[in-house]
Amino acid sequence: MEVRAFLAALATANGRPVMPTLDVRDLASGRAVSLDDPAVLQRPQAHEATVSVAGQFLVFRPLSRASLDPFFGR
């Protein structure tokens, strides 16, 4: 599911906009990195993002910088 559609579905279900917790890891090292780390923005496909929603953990691998834009409010 596209990230924007996922966030829209969360907002509809909760009756208000929701920004879930997001953790990002470098795939090669397993090291946790900040979402605004330049490496994440330059090579998003080299990272894995875990979204936490209502006690569930959803993992996705961003294929482009644009797939992370909704988490920056863009």
Image (cartoon, rainbow, N blue to C red):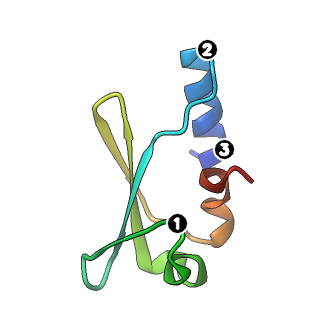
Residue 25: x, y in percent? Answer: 34, 70
**Where the C terminus falls, by quadrant?**
bottom right
Of 1 and 6, nearer the camera is: 6
Residue 46 seen by the camera: yes
Q: Earlier in the sequence, mark 3 or mark 2?
A: 3
Residue 36: x, y in percent? Answer: 54, 70
Residue 62: which disc?
Answer: 1
Residue 2 seen by the camera: no
Residue farthest along the left direction in this orientation: 30
Q: Helix or strand or loop: what does disc 1 sit on?
A: loop
With 12 as the anchor, is 36 left or right in this view? left
Q: Helix or strand or loop: what does disc 2 sit on?
A: loop
The amino acid at mark 1 is: Pro
Q: Nearer the viewer, mark 3 or mark 2?
A: 2
Q: Nearer the viewer, mark 1 or mark 2?
A: 2
Please tell me whether residue 19 is drawn above or below residue 40 in the rendered image: above
- Measuring 69% from the left and 50% from the top, which residue is drawn there? 73
The amino acid at mark 2 is: Gly
